[in-house]
Protein backbone atom coordinates (compact mmCIF):
# COMPACT_ATOMS: atom_id res chain seq x y z
CA UNK A 1 0.00 0.00 0.00
CA UNK A 2 1.33 3.42 -0.95
CA UNK A 3 1.20 6.01 1.82
CA UNK A 4 -1.49 8.64 1.36
CA UNK A 5 -0.04 12.17 1.43
CA UNK A 6 -0.74 15.86 0.95
CA UNK A 7 1.88 17.42 -1.34
CA UNK A 8 3.02 21.04 -0.92
CA UNK A 9 5.35 22.51 -3.53
CA UNK A 10 7.34 25.62 -2.59
CA UNK A 11 6.94 24.47 1.02
CA UNK A 12 9.84 26.61 2.21
CA UNK A 13 8.26 29.84 0.98
CA UNK A 14 6.09 32.35 2.82
CA UNK A 15 2.72 30.74 2.15
CA UNK A 16 4.29 27.27 2.41
CA UNK A 17 5.21 28.08 6.02
CA UNK A 18 1.71 29.37 6.76
CA UNK A 19 0.11 26.30 5.21
CA UNK A 20 2.36 23.86 7.03
CA UNK A 21 1.67 25.64 10.32
CA UNK A 22 -2.07 25.44 9.79
CA UNK A 23 -2.45 21.99 8.22
CA UNK A 24 -0.20 20.44 10.87
CA UNK A 25 -2.19 22.15 13.62
CA UNK A 26 -5.34 20.65 12.13
CA UNK A 27 -3.88 17.17 12.49
CA UNK A 28 -2.35 16.49 9.07
CA UNK A 29 0.56 14.18 9.78
CA UNK A 30 1.07 13.29 6.14
CA UNK A 31 2.55 16.43 4.60
CA UNK A 32 5.31 16.06 2.02
CA UNK A 33 7.04 19.20 0.79
CA UNK A 34 9.13 19.97 -2.27
CA UNK A 35 11.39 22.99 -2.56
CA UNK A 36 14.64 24.00 -4.23
CA UNK A 37 16.06 24.95 -0.85
CA UNK A 38 16.48 22.91 2.30
CA UNK A 39 13.48 23.26 4.57
CA UNK A 40 14.07 25.04 7.86
CA UNK A 41 13.43 23.33 11.20
CA UNK A 42 9.91 24.80 11.51
CA UNK A 43 8.84 23.09 8.29
CA UNK A 44 10.85 19.88 8.91
CA UNK A 45 9.26 19.38 12.33
CA UNK A 46 5.76 19.57 10.86
CA UNK A 47 6.15 17.46 7.72
CA UNK A 48 6.69 13.78 6.98
CA UNK A 49 9.44 14.64 4.53
CA UNK A 50 10.78 17.61 2.60
CA UNK A 51 12.26 16.77 -0.75
CA UNK A 52 14.92 19.11 -2.05
CA UNK A 53 14.24 19.32 -5.76
CA UNK A 54 12.81 21.13 -8.74
CA UNK A 55 9.21 20.88 -9.93
CA UNK A 56 10.70 20.86 -13.44
CA UNK A 57 12.45 17.56 -12.63
CA UNK A 58 10.09 14.94 -14.06
CA UNK A 59 12.17 12.10 -12.57
CA UNK A 60 11.51 13.48 -9.09
CA UNK A 61 7.78 13.73 -9.81
CA UNK A 62 7.79 10.18 -11.22
CA UNK A 63 9.35 8.94 -7.97
CA UNK A 64 6.65 10.71 -5.96
CA UNK A 65 4.01 9.25 -8.24
CA UNK A 66 5.36 5.73 -7.70
CA UNK A 67 5.98 6.03 -3.98
CA UNK A 68 2.90 7.85 -2.69
CA UNK A 69 -0.83 8.15 -3.08
CA UNK A 70 -1.43 11.89 -3.40
CA UNK A 71 -4.77 13.08 -1.90
CA UNK A 72 -4.30 16.74 -2.67
CA UNK A 73 -1.71 19.16 -4.00
CA UNK A 74 -1.03 22.69 -2.80
CA UNK A 75 1.10 24.04 -5.62
CA UNK A 76 2.87 27.07 -4.16
CA UNK A 77 6.25 26.94 -5.96
CA UNK A 78 6.72 29.88 -8.33
CA UNK A 79 8.95 32.76 -9.33
CA UNK A 80 7.23 35.91 -8.03
CA UNK A 81 6.47 39.05 -10.02
CA UNK A 82 9.66 41.08 -9.61
CA UNK A 83 11.98 38.13 -10.12
CA UNK A 84 9.91 36.97 -13.09
CA UNK A 85 10.32 40.37 -14.76
CA UNK A 86 14.11 40.02 -14.58
CA UNK A 87 14.09 36.43 -15.90
CA UNK A 88 10.92 36.02 -17.95
CA UNK A 89 11.92 32.81 -19.74
CA UNK A 90 12.91 31.05 -16.52
CA UNK A 91 9.71 32.38 -14.92
CA UNK A 92 7.66 30.89 -17.73
CA UNK A 93 9.40 27.55 -17.28
CA UNK A 94 8.89 27.42 -13.51
CA UNK A 95 5.45 29.01 -13.38
CA UNK A 96 3.87 27.38 -16.44
CA UNK A 97 5.83 24.18 -17.18
CA UNK A 98 6.13 23.52 -13.44
CA UNK A 99 2.36 23.90 -13.01
CA UNK A 100 1.74 21.66 -16.01
CA UNK A 101 3.96 18.99 -14.41
CA UNK A 102 2.01 19.19 -11.16
CA UNK A 103 -1.36 19.03 -12.95
CA UNK A 104 -0.09 16.01 -14.85
CA UNK A 105 0.95 14.35 -11.60
CA UNK A 106 -2.52 15.08 -10.18
CA UNK A 107 -4.16 13.48 -13.23
CA UNK A 108 -1.92 10.36 -13.04
CA UNK A 109 -2.68 10.02 -9.35
CA UNK A 110 -6.42 10.50 -9.80
CA UNK A 111 -6.49 7.82 -12.49
CA UNK A 112 -4.57 5.33 -10.37
CA UNK A 113 -6.70 6.04 -7.25
CA UNK A 114 -9.94 6.18 -9.24
CA UNK A 115 -10.74 9.28 -7.21
CA UNK A 116 -10.38 13.02 -7.75
CA UNK A 117 -7.23 14.79 -6.57
CA UNK A 118 -7.83 18.26 -5.16
CA UNK A 119 -5.44 20.83 -6.55
CA UNK A 120 -4.94 24.29 -5.05
CA UNK A 121 -3.37 26.95 -7.25
CA UNK A 122 -2.48 30.40 -5.83
CA UNK A 123 -3.19 32.92 -8.55
CA UNK A 124 -2.78 36.65 -8.15
CA UNK A 125 -4.23 40.10 -8.80
CA UNK A 126 -1.31 40.31 -11.28
CA UNK A 127 -3.64 38.68 -13.85
CA UNK A 128 -5.36 42.07 -14.11
CA UNK A 129 -4.01 44.89 -16.22
CA UNK A 130 -5.64 48.30 -15.86
CA UNK A 131 -4.71 50.41 -18.89
CA UNK A 132 -4.29 53.74 -17.06
CA UNK A 133 -4.30 55.30 -13.60
CA UNK A 134 -7.55 57.06 -14.46
CA UNK A 135 -9.21 53.76 -15.27
CA UNK A 136 -7.70 52.19 -12.16
CA UNK A 137 -9.32 54.80 -9.90
CA UNK A 138 -12.68 54.76 -11.70
CA UNK A 139 -12.95 50.96 -12.16
CA UNK A 140 -14.35 50.18 -8.70
CA UNK A 141 -14.05 46.63 -7.36
CA UNK A 142 -12.84 44.49 -10.29
CA UNK A 143 -14.71 41.25 -11.00
CA UNK A 144 -12.98 38.00 -12.00
CA UNK A 145 -13.76 38.41 -15.72
CA UNK A 146 -12.76 42.08 -16.00
CA UNK A 147 -9.45 43.59 -17.15
CA UNK A 148 -7.64 40.28 -17.72
CA UNK A 149 -4.79 41.88 -19.65
CA UNK A 150 -1.69 41.22 -17.53
CA UNK A 151 1.32 43.43 -18.13
CA UNK A 152 3.90 41.17 -16.45
CA UNK A 153 5.29 37.73 -17.27
CA UNK A 154 4.12 36.61 -13.81
CA UNK A 155 0.56 37.80 -14.50
CA UNK A 156 0.56 36.09 -17.92
CA UNK A 157 1.79 32.86 -16.30
CA UNK A 158 -0.89 32.96 -13.59
CA UNK A 159 -3.72 33.69 -16.03
CA UNK A 160 -2.66 30.88 -18.36
CA UNK A 161 -2.28 28.42 -15.46
CA UNK A 162 -5.84 29.16 -14.36
CA UNK A 163 -6.91 28.08 -17.85
CA UNK A 164 -4.70 24.99 -17.65
CA UNK A 165 -6.39 24.07 -14.39
CA UNK A 166 -9.79 24.49 -16.01
CA UNK A 167 -8.64 22.30 -18.92
CA UNK A 168 -7.37 19.53 -16.64
CA UNK A 169 -10.58 19.68 -14.55
CA UNK A 170 -13.14 19.78 -17.33
CA UNK A 171 -11.79 19.10 -20.81
CA UNK A 172 -8.66 16.91 -20.52
CA UNK A 173 -8.19 14.76 -23.65
CA UNK A 174 -11.86 15.01 -24.48
CA UNK A 175 -11.37 13.18 -27.78
CA UNK A 176 -10.09 10.01 -26.08
CA UNK A 177 -12.40 7.16 -25.13
CA UNK A 178 -11.81 7.52 -21.37
CA UNK A 179 -13.62 10.33 -19.61
CA UNK A 180 -11.24 12.25 -17.32
CA UNK A 181 -13.70 14.98 -16.36
CA UNK A 182 -13.51 15.93 -12.69
CA UNK A 183 -10.47 13.78 -11.91
CA UNK A 184 -8.44 16.89 -11.17
CA UNK A 185 -10.46 19.09 -8.82
CA UNK A 186 -8.73 22.44 -9.49
CA UNK A 187 -9.47 25.39 -7.19
CA UNK A 188 -7.79 28.75 -7.33
CA UNK A 189 -7.73 32.10 -5.54
CA UNK A 190 -6.41 35.37 -6.96
CA UNK A 191 -4.56 36.66 -3.93
CA UNK A 192 -3.78 40.30 -3.23
CA UNK A 193 -0.46 41.17 -1.58
CA UNK A 194 -0.02 39.01 1.53
CA UNK A 195 1.52 40.30 4.76
CA UNK A 196 3.11 37.83 7.16
CA UNK A 197 4.43 38.57 10.64
CA UNK A 198 6.65 35.50 10.56
CA UNK A 199 8.40 35.61 7.20
CA UNK A 200 9.75 38.32 4.94
CA UNK A 201 8.75 38.38 1.29
CA UNK A 202 11.26 38.18 -1.55
CA UNK A 203 10.71 38.93 -5.18
CA UNK A 204 7.14 40.25 -5.20
CA UNK A 205 5.93 43.71 -6.25
CA UNK A 206 3.63 44.07 -3.23
CA UNK A 207 6.58 43.49 -0.87
CA UNK A 208 6.72 47.18 0.16
CA UNK A 209 3.94 46.86 2.77
CA UNK A 210 5.43 43.90 4.69
CA UNK A 211 8.92 45.39 4.25
CA UNK A 212 7.75 48.67 5.87
CA UNK A 213 6.43 47.05 9.00
CA UNK A 214 9.33 44.63 9.45
CA UNK A 215 11.85 47.49 8.95
CA UNK A 216 9.95 49.63 11.48
CA UNK A 217 9.94 46.82 14.04
CA UNK A 218 13.68 46.30 13.57
CA UNK A 219 14.34 50.05 13.85
CA UNK A 220 15.81 50.10 10.33
CA UNK A 221 15.49 52.72 7.60
CA UNK A 222 13.39 51.71 4.58
CA UNK A 223 12.94 53.23 1.13
CA UNK A 224 9.48 52.39 -0.14
CA UNK A 225 9.72 51.82 -3.91
CA UNK A 226 6.20 53.05 -4.77
CA UNK A 227 4.56 56.43 -4.20
CA UNK A 228 2.54 57.16 -1.07
CA UNK A 229 -0.73 57.18 -3.06
CA UNK A 230 -0.13 53.75 -4.67
CA UNK A 231 -3.07 51.54 -3.76
CA UNK A 232 -3.67 47.79 -4.15
CA UNK A 233 -5.48 45.20 -2.00
CA UNK A 234 -3.70 43.29 0.77
CA UNK A 235 -4.54 40.65 3.34
CA UNK A 236 -2.82 38.99 6.27
CA UNK A 237 -1.18 35.58 6.00
CA UNK A 238 -3.67 33.96 8.44
CA UNK A 239 -6.52 35.19 6.22
CA UNK A 240 -4.77 33.88 3.09
CA UNK A 241 -4.44 30.46 4.74
CA UNK A 242 -8.04 30.63 5.97
CA UNK A 243 -9.19 31.34 2.41
CA UNK A 244 -7.25 28.33 1.09
CA UNK A 245 -8.76 26.09 3.77
CA UNK A 246 -12.28 27.34 3.05
CA UNK A 247 -12.10 26.84 -0.70
CA UNK A 248 -10.48 23.42 -0.34
CA UNK A 249 -13.20 22.31 2.11
CA UNK A 250 -16.10 23.60 0.00
CA UNK A 251 -18.32 20.96 -1.63
CA UNK A 252 -17.49 20.86 -5.35
CA UNK A 253 -21.13 21.53 -6.31
CA UNK A 254 -20.98 24.90 -4.49
CA UNK A 255 -18.16 26.17 -6.70
CA UNK A 256 -19.58 28.08 -9.64
CA UNK A 257 -16.16 29.08 -10.99
CA UNK A 258 -12.59 27.79 -10.81
CA UNK A 259 -10.95 31.02 -9.69
CA UNK A 260 -12.06 33.56 -7.09
CA UNK A 261 -11.11 37.01 -5.91
CA UNK A 262 -10.75 37.54 -2.16
CA UNK A 263 -10.23 40.82 -0.35
CA UNK A 264 -9.59 42.24 3.10
CA UNK A 265 -8.25 45.86 3.01
CA UNK A 266 -6.69 48.17 0.45
CA UNK A 267 -4.74 51.05 1.96
CA UNK A 268 -2.52 53.35 -0.06
CA UNK A 269 1.18 52.98 0.77
CA UNK A 270 0.91 56.28 2.70
CA UNK A 271 -2.08 55.07 4.71
CA UNK A 272 -0.20 51.86 5.48
CA UNK A 273 2.77 53.92 6.70
CA UNK A 274 0.51 55.99 9.00
CA UNK A 275 -0.75 52.77 10.54
CA UNK A 276 2.84 51.58 11.04
CA UNK A 277 3.61 54.93 12.70
CA UNK A 278 0.73 54.44 15.17
CA UNK A 279 2.79 51.61 16.64
CA UNK A 280 6.33 52.69 15.73
CA UNK A 281 6.29 56.52 15.84
CA UNK A 282 10.03 56.78 15.18
CA UNK A 283 9.70 54.85 11.92
CA UNK A 284 12.18 56.10 9.30
CA UNK A 285 10.63 55.46 5.88
CA UNK A 286 11.03 57.45 2.66
CA UNK A 287 9.17 57.09 -0.61
CA UNK A 288 11.82 56.67 -3.32
CA UNK A 289 9.79 55.65 -6.35
CA UNK A 290 11.11 53.02 -8.71
CA UNK A 291 9.21 53.94 -11.89
CA UNK A 292 9.17 50.42 -13.32
CA UNK A 293 7.87 48.77 -10.16
CA UNK A 294 5.40 51.63 -9.70
CA UNK A 295 4.07 51.02 -13.24
CA UNK A 296 3.36 47.40 -12.32
CA UNK A 297 1.45 48.46 -9.19
CA UNK A 298 -0.42 51.05 -11.29
CA UNK A 299 -1.66 48.25 -13.56
CA UNK A 300 -3.08 46.21 -10.65
CA UNK A 301 -6.58 47.01 -9.37
CA UNK A 302 -7.25 49.24 -6.37
CA UNK A 303 -9.97 46.89 -5.25
CA UNK A 304 -11.47 43.53 -6.25
CA UNK A 305 -15.01 42.18 -6.05
CA UNK A 306 -15.12 39.00 -3.96
CA UNK A 307 -18.90 38.50 -3.96
CA UNK A 308 -18.58 35.04 -5.54
CA UNK A 309 -16.17 33.79 -2.87
CA UNK A 310 -18.59 35.05 -0.23
CA UNK A 311 -21.65 33.40 -1.73
CA UNK A 312 -20.05 30.15 -2.95
CA UNK A 313 -17.85 29.23 -0.01
CA UNK A 314 -18.57 31.69 2.78
CA UNK A 315 -15.46 33.87 2.47
CA UNK A 316 -15.14 36.73 4.92
CA UNK A 317 -11.78 38.17 5.97
CA UNK A 318 -11.13 38.19 9.72
CA UNK A 319 -8.64 41.10 9.61
CA UNK A 320 -9.49 44.56 8.32
CA UNK A 321 -6.58 47.03 8.36
CA UNK A 322 -7.03 47.92 12.04
CA UNK A 323 -7.38 44.33 13.20
CA UNK A 324 -4.49 43.23 10.95
CA UNK A 325 -2.24 45.49 13.03
CA UNK A 326 -3.80 45.17 16.48
CA UNK A 327 -4.68 41.46 16.49
CA UNK A 328 -1.96 39.94 14.31
CA UNK A 329 0.98 41.95 12.97
CA UNK A 330 1.97 43.96 16.04
CA UNK A 331 1.72 41.20 18.68
CA UNK A 332 3.45 38.60 16.47
CA UNK A 333 6.13 40.94 15.14
CA UNK A 334 6.88 42.29 18.62
CA UNK A 335 7.44 38.82 19.97
CA UNK A 336 9.63 38.05 16.97
CA UNK A 337 11.95 41.08 17.20
CA UNK A 338 11.76 42.25 20.77
N1 LIG B 1 3.04 36.22 -1.20
C1 LIG B 1 2.15 36.90 -1.91
O1 LIG B 1 1.88 38.08 -1.64
C2 LIG B 1 1.41 36.20 -3.03
C3 LIG B 1 0.32 36.85 -3.64
C4 LIG B 1 -0.33 36.21 -4.69
C5 LIG B 1 0.05 34.94 -5.09
N2 LIG B 1 1.10 34.33 -4.46
C6 LIG B 1 1.50 33.01 -4.95
O2 LIG B 1 1.55 32.10 -3.88
C7 LIG B 1 2.60 31.13 -4.10
C8 LIG B 1 3.55 31.11 -2.93
O3 LIG B 1 4.02 32.43 -2.73
P1 LIG B 1 5.07 32.77 -1.60
O4 LIG B 1 4.83 34.16 -1.20
O5 LIG B 1 5.10 31.68 -0.59
O6 LIG B 1 6.41 32.74 -2.46
P2 LIG B 1 7.90 32.43 -1.98
O7 LIG B 1 8.82 33.00 -3.00
O8 LIG B 1 8.07 32.83 -0.56
O9 LIG B 1 7.94 30.84 -2.04
C9 LIG B 1 8.03 30.13 -3.24
C10 LIG B 1 8.85 28.89 -2.94
O10 LIG B 1 8.92 28.14 -4.16
C11 LIG B 1 10.22 27.59 -4.27
N3 LIG B 1 10.50 27.32 -5.68
C12 LIG B 1 10.72 28.23 -6.66
N4 LIG B 1 10.98 27.59 -7.81
C13 LIG B 1 10.92 26.26 -7.55
C14 LIG B 1 11.11 25.11 -8.34
N5 LIG B 1 11.43 25.20 -9.65
N6 LIG B 1 10.97 23.89 -7.76
C15 LIG B 1 10.65 23.78 -6.43
N7 LIG B 1 10.47 24.86 -5.64
C16 LIG B 1 10.61 26.09 -6.18
C17 LIG B 1 11.14 28.67 -3.69
O11 LIG B 1 12.39 28.12 -3.28
C18 LIG B 1 10.30 29.21 -2.54
O12 LIG B 1 10.61 28.58 -1.32
C19 LIG B 1 3.25 31.53 -5.41
O13 LIG B 1 2.70 30.78 -6.46
C20 LIG B 1 2.88 32.99 -5.56
O14 LIG B 1 2.85 33.36 -6.91
C21 LIG B 1 1.78 34.93 -3.46
Image (cartoon, rainbow, N blue to C red):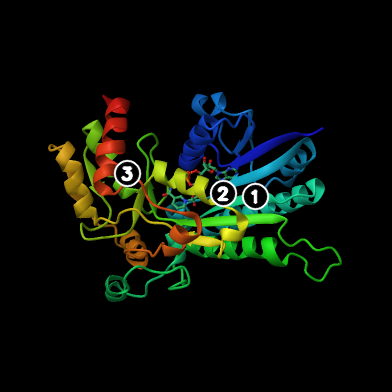
Q: Which residue is mark 1?
A: 118
Element marked by disc 1: strand
CA gap between label 1 and label 3 equals 31 Å
Residue contact between numbered discs 2 and 1, judged by CB atoms under 8 Å: yes
State whether label 3 is within 8 Å of ligand 1. Answer: no
- Residue under pointer 3: 210
Residues under numbered marks 2 and 3 in contact, where contact means CB atoms less than 8 Å apart: no
Compared with residue 327, is residue 190 higher up or lower down, i.e. above or below? below
Query: Residue 250 location, x and y as percent?
Result: 56, 52
Q: Where does the C terminus fall, quadrant-wise?
A: top left
Q: Residue furthest right?
A: 177
Q: Nearer the viewer, residue 125 or 251?
A: 251
- Which is in the foreground here, disc 2 or disc 3? 2
Task: Name which residue lies at 78% across and 69% down.
Answer: 174
Q: Separation of disc 2 and disc 3 at Cα? A: 26 Å
Q: Earlier in the sequence, mark 2 or mark 3?
A: 3
Label 2, on which residue? 248
Kindly tell me whether mark 2's CB lies below 8 Å from ligand 1.
Answer: no
Q: Answer whether residue 115 is visible to the viewer in this image.
A: yes
Q: Judge from the rendering whether residue 55 lies leftward or rightward of residue 240; answer left or right.
A: right
The number of numbered badges drawn on the structure is 3
Q: Reply above or below: 316 against 306.
A: above
Tell which tag, 1 or 3, sits nearer the viewer: 1
Residue plotted at (60% across, 41% down): 8
First of labels 1, 3 by sequence position: 1
Mark 2 Cα shell of 10 Å, populated few (<14), some (14-19), many (≥20):
many
Dot 3: element: helix
Amino acid sequence: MRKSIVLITGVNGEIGHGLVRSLHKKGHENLIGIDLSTADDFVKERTLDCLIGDILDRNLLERINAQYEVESIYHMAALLSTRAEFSPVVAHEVNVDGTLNMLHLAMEQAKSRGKAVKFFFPSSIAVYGLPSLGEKSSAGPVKEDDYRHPQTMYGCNKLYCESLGDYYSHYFKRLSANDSKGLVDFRSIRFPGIISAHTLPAGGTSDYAPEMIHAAAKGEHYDCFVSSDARIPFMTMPDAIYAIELIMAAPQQNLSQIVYNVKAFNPSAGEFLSKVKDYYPKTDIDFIVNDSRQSIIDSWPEDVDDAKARSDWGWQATHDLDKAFSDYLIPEIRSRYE
